[in-house]
Amino acid sequence: MPQREIVTQELASLFGALSHPHRVRIIEELGQSEQDVNHLAEILKCSHSRVSQHLKQLKAHRLVTPRREGRHVYYSLAEPRVARWVLEGLDFTEAALLQPGRIRAAMASARDEWGEK
């Protein structure tokens, strides 16, 4: 298999791992600090099992790493720069918006909340 094909498949797989809003949010939350499944479920307003499924996919793509402490498992980013990289994606999305308003305000809020802390 040509090397370019291998690389493009790997990149497509990475982008696929980030193709769900909850997984993007998990990346951003873990960019702030390590979290357990219960806390992420509370933030995302979804079930414990759904968050676990998202974390399993992120772990399979080597984006998050678990740390066990007794019966609790805490997750952190395997590479903290990925949170900044995802945040930079706002630049592309924001530039493509034709109308300001609610989405642009939400992006500004996310940039402030997830940005340089």
Image (cartoon, grey):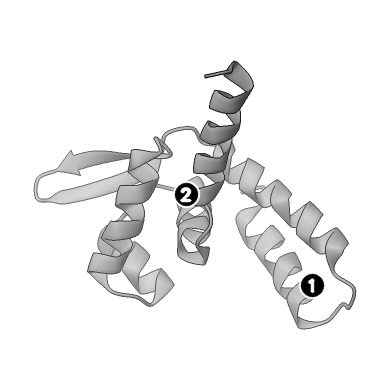
Identified at 87% across, 77% down, the residue is 100
Residue placed under numbered mark 1 in the picture: 104
Identified at 77% across, 60% down, the residue is 93
Inspect the image, locate mark 2, and give the three-letter code of the amino acid beneath it.
Answer: Ala
Horizontal arrangement in the rendering, residue 50 relative to residue 14 (left or right): left
Quadrant for residue 37, please give it: bottom left
Where does the image place residue 63, in percent across and percent down from the top left? 43, 39
Looking at the image, how many numbered discs can be counted on the residues?
A: 2
Horizontal arrangement in the rendering, residue 93 relative to residue 98 (left or right): left
Where does the image place residue 64, in percent across and percent down from the top left? 38, 41
Query: Against 94, is 42 above or below?
Result: below
Horizontal arrangement in the rendering, residue 83 relative to residue 46 (left or right): right
Can residue 32 be seen here? The reply is: no
| Number of the front mark, 2 or 1 | 2
Q: Nearer the viewer, residue 80 or 117?
A: 80
* Element assignment for label 2: helix
Say if mark 2 contacts mark 1, CB within 8 Å: no
**Residue at the left extreme?**
70
* Real-space CA distance between mark 2 and mark 1, rounded to the nearest whole angstrom: 25 Å
Inspect the image, locate mark 1, and give the three-letter code of the amino acid beneath it.
Answer: Arg
Can residue 41 be seen here? The reply is: yes
Where does the image place residue 102, in percent across and percent down from the top left? 76, 82
Where does the image place residue 32, in percent across and percent down from the top left? 50, 49
Q: Nearer the viewer, residue 59 or 113?
A: 59
Which one is earlier in the sequence, the residue at label 2 or at label 1?
2
**Residue at the bottom extreme?**
102
Query: Against 68, is 43 above or below?
Result: below
Query: Few, some or many C-alpha atoms within 10 Å of disc 1 (few <14, some 14-19, many ≥20)?
Result: some
* Element assignment for label 1: helix
Query: Against 86, is 43 above or below?
Result: below
Circle on res. 17: 2
Identified at 38% across, 77% down, the residue is 45
